[in-house]
Structures are given as C-alpha cells and as structure tokens.
C-alpha cells in the first residue's frame, strides 16, 4: 500500500515520518512538503495527483505559527477561501 503524507515538515508530519522510519516501512510512504504539493494552488494539487497515485492520503498540513502567519498572510487567506468554497 502506498501512502502520501501531506505536510511533511510540520509537527505531525515529522512525527509520522519518525514512526515510519522506526518501523522500517518507509518504502511505502511518500512525504510531501509545501514545495512539492501546494494546497493553496488547485493546479499544483491536480498536477500532483495526475503524476502519482496513492492508496491512502494523510493530510497533516497545518499552520500554527502566529508570527509566520503575519509574514505569509496572503498565502493563508487563499487557503481559507478555498476551504470555504
């Protein structure tokens, strides 16, 4: 079974990766960061899934840094708009 973990650089994504590595089952997991899979860009998401197939997808993408949010407010407003659509 092939599993995609979105948000690989976040707290949950890193924890999942650590557990996968401890269990030595990393060959069946793909860990995607924002650089590879931009949830704010529908074309990026579409292109990614046209190129790769998965049996299971874990979305661990989240944003918890208030200071970081202030710096990247436009990005997160786009994300919020898509969530509400």
Image (cartoon, rainbow, N blue to C red):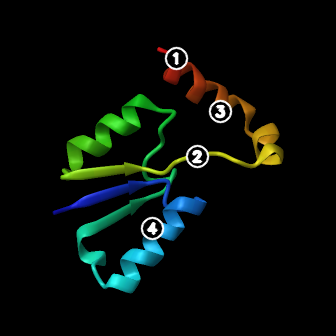
At which x and y percent is residue 27?
A: 25, 76
Question: Earlier along the polypeptide chain: callout 2 or callout 4?
Answer: 4
Q: Which residue is mark 4?
A: 16
Q: Which image quarter is the N terminus in? A: bottom left
State if disc 4 and disc 2 touch (CB < 8 Å).
no
Mark-to-mark CA distance, 4 and 3: 24 Å
Q: Nearer the viewer, mark 1 or mark 3?
A: 1
Q: For label 3, count other residues whose C-alpha is less than 10 Å away and answer few (under 14), some (14-19) or many (20+).
A: some
* First reached walking from the N terminus: tag 1 or tag 4: 4
Residue that carries the numbered disc 3 in the rendered image:
76
- Residue 84, numbered circle: 1
Please name the residue shown 44% across and 71% down the image. Answer: 17
Q: Residues within 10 Å of mark 4 (few under 14, many from 20)?
A: some
Which of the two discs, 3 and 2, sits closer to the camera? 2
Disc 3 is placed on an element classified as helix
Q: Earlier in the sequence, mark 2 or mark 1?
A: 2
Check if mark 3's residue and mark 2's residue have beta carbons within 8 Å: no
Q: Which residue is mark 2?
A: 62
Left/right placement of residue 44 relative to residue 78 reads left
Marks 2 and 1, Cα distance to the nearest angstrom? 16 Å
For the residues carrying marks 4 and 3, which lies nearer the camera in this image? 4
Would you identify the image quadrant in which residue 63 lies? top right
Question: For the residue labelled by badge 4, is the local secondary structure a helix, a strand or a loop?
Answer: helix
Above or below for 8 versus 37: below
Expressed as whole percent of the image width and height from the top left, the position of residue 14 reads: 53, 68
Q: Nearer the viewer, residue 41 or 28?
A: 28
């Amino acid at each position: 079974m092939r599993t995609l973990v979105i948000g690989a650089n976040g707290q949950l994504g890193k924890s999942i990766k650590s557990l996968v590595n401890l269990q030595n089952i990393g060959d069946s997991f793909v860990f995607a960061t924002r650089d590879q899979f931009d949830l704010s860009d529908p074309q990026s998401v579409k292109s990614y899934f046209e190129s790769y197939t998965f049996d299971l997808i874990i979305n661990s993408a989240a944003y918890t840094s208030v200071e970081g949010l202030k710096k990247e407010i436009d990005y997160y407003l786009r994300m919020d708009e898509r969530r509400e659509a």
